[in-house]
Amino acid sequence: MDGATIYNRLAVLRVERNLSRQELATALGISYQTVGYLERGEYNPSLELAFKLSDFFSLPIEAIFSRQPLKPLSEEIYPAKK
Amino acid sequence: MATHNLNLEGLGHGRSQKQRRRMVLVAYMSFVGMLIIVAVSVFSGHLFFVDPTRTRGTPHFFFYTVLSGTLTITWPILMLISIFNNISLSRALPEYTMKQSTLDERQLRVRDSAYRYSYAIVSLAILGIFIFKFFTLFPGVHFVQPSINRFEFSLFLMSIGGLMNLVPLSIIAWNERD
C-alpha cells in the first residue's frame, strides 16, 4: 500500500446499494479490480476518484474515508447502551 | 432483488491470478531452459567435441551426437512454448496490452512500476551479456573458456528481446489480483 493507511466504507456502501463491483466500476469509469483494491484498503484513491465516489454515494468524503479505523455504521446510528 | 454475487465477478482478465501465475512460471522456466541449452551447447562443444573422423563409432562420438541432437530439438520447442506463453499473457491482460487501452489511475501506476522494474532487470541482463562477451573477446582476461559464435550470440539477443516483452507482463500478471 502507498503511504498512510486510509480506511473506508466502500464495501458496505456498495452492498447497501446492491451493486456489484463491476457496476460500481462502470459508474466510476475504473476497473472492477480497482474497486476490490479500494475496498480492501490496498490502494488509496486520488483526490479526483475520492470526489467521484463521494458524488456517486451522495455522501461527504469524510463519511467514506477516514484516517482512523471506521466504526460499523450500525454502531454509529445506534450507539451501544451503557 | 438482484441475486448476483456482489463480491465475485466474472473474471475480467479471462484468467484467474492462479492461472496467470502458472503461465508466468512456465514462461520463465522455458526461458531459463533455453539459456541452459545455449550454455550446455557452448560448453559441451569445447568439452566433448573431438574430430569426428577419429572418433566415429566410439561411445564418445555417440554421446556427443545424442547430446547435440537433443539440444537442437529442445531449443525450438522451448522457444515456441515461450512465444506461446508471451501471447497468452498478453491476451490474459487485455487492458494492459491493447493499443487503445483505458487504464484507470491504479492500473497506470501498476504498469509504470512494472516497466520501471523491467528496465532495470533487462539492463542488468544486457550488461551481463556484454561482460561475458568482454571476457570471451580478450583471451588474456579469460576466466570462462568458450568463445561464442555469431549464431549463439544472436540466440542471446533473441532471448533478450523475448525478455523485454515477458518481464513487464509477468510482473503485472503475477501481482494483479482478481
Image (cartoon, coloured by chain):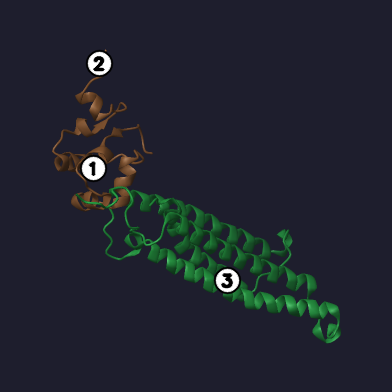
Q: Position of residue B58 (x, y in %)?
A: 86, 82
Give the chain letter at badge 3: B
Q: Which chain is green?
A: B
Question: Badge 3 is on which residue?
Answer: B78
Q: Is the residue B152 above or below the residue A77 in the image?
A: below
- Name the one closer to the observer, B106 or B115: B106
For badge 3, the amino acid type reads: Leu
Mark 1 and mark 2 on one chain: yes
Q: Position of residue B122 (x, y in %)?
A: 50, 58
C-alpha span from label 3 to label 2? 68 Å
Label 2: state its secondary structure.
loop
C-alpha span from label 1 to label 2? 28 Å
The numbered dot on residue A81 is 2
For badge 1, the amino acid type reads: Arg
Q: Can residue B150 be seen from the camera position used here? A: no
Quarter residue B156 falls in: bottom right
The residue sitting at 51% across, 54% down in the picture is B121
- Name the one closer to the observer, B87 or B158: B87
Q: Is the residue B66 above or below the residue B11 in the image?
A: below
C-alpha span from label 3 to label 1? 47 Å
Question: Badge 1 is on which residue?
Answer: A14
Q: Who comes first in sequence, dot 1 or dot 2?
A: 1
Give the chain letter at badge 2: A
Chain A takes which shade in the image?
Answer: brown
Label 3: state its secondary structure.
helix
- Mark 1 neighbour class, 10 Å CA radius: few under 14, some 14 to 19, many 20 or more: some
Q: Position of residue B10 (x, y in %)?
A: 32, 57
Q: Is residue B164 left or right of residue B34?
A: left
Which of labels 3 and 1 is toward the front? 1
For badge 2, the amino acid type reads: Lys
The residue sitting at 14% across, 41% down in the picture is A55
| Disc 3 and disc 2 in contact, CB within 8 angstroms | no
